Amino acid sequence: MRNFIVAARGQVVGFDMLARWRVPHLEDVATFLLALRLLGPRVTTLGASHPNAVVAEWRTAFLEGYGEPTPPALPVFEALVLLDRWAALVTRPTRRGPVAKGLRRLEHRALEREADRVARVLA
């Protein structure tokens, strides 16, 4: 979330300071929006810290500021980013201890809910 600024006219602008990656702009947008939905406090409180309605307002405000309120291809990129994050989670070595295992279960649950949401949008 560090690579976004607000331009003088209120538009949200994303940039890659190292210029290492060349990806479709909607992949960056989807990455940012997924990060909003999977904020640590949301994951650990099962969404109670930031209810879905609040996150939906943030999403709408971001996309309006970005200048493209409803990009038609965005759900496809959201699915791509979600699957990439989930793959990273399941291939990461499991840390020991009840707290680490509990956090991993919560992250899986959050990713499952997000996958259900994206699947409904794509259907």
Image: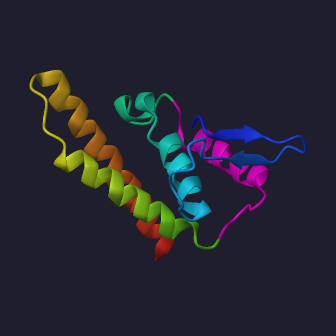
Q: Main secondary structure of the magenta part?
A: helix
Left or right: where does residue 38 sit relative to residue 6? left
- Taking the image as shown, residue 53 lies to the left or right of residue 10, namely left
Residue 29 position (above or below residue 77): above
Q: Residue at x 52, y 67 (%)?
A: 75
Image coordinates of residue 56 in percent, x first then y, are 61, 47
> Furthest-bottom residue in view?
123
Taking the image as shown, residue 87 lies to the left or right of residue 30, namely left
Q: So how many labels did they put on this image?
A: 0
* Between 94 and 21, the one nearer to me in the picture: 21
Q: Position of residue 108 (x, y in %)?
A: 26, 45
In the image, 3 versus 85, the foreground residue is 3
Assess whether residue 101 is covered by the magenta stretch. no
Q: Quadrant of the N terminus?
A: top right
Snapshot quadrant of residue 53: top right
Q: Residue at the spot x=53%, y=37% of the render?
A: 51
Q: In the rendered view, would you say 103 is above or below 69? A: above
- Residue 28, position in %: x, y? 56, 54
Per the rendered image, the range of residues in magenta is 50-71
Determine the residue located farthest toward the left in the rendered image. 96
Q: Is 89 left, or right, of 8 in this rendering?
A: left
Q: Please give the name of the residue rendered at 22% of the width and 36% of the height, measured from the top-left corner.
A: 104
Colour pattern = rainbow
Identity of the residue furthest to the right in this view: 9
Say which residue appears at 42% left-offset and 64% top-offset: 79
Q: Nearer the viewer, residue 123 or 85?
A: 85
The percent coordinates of residue 105 (x first, y second) are 21, 39
**Which quarter of the picture shows residue 110?**
top left
Q: Is residue 67 magenta?
A: yes
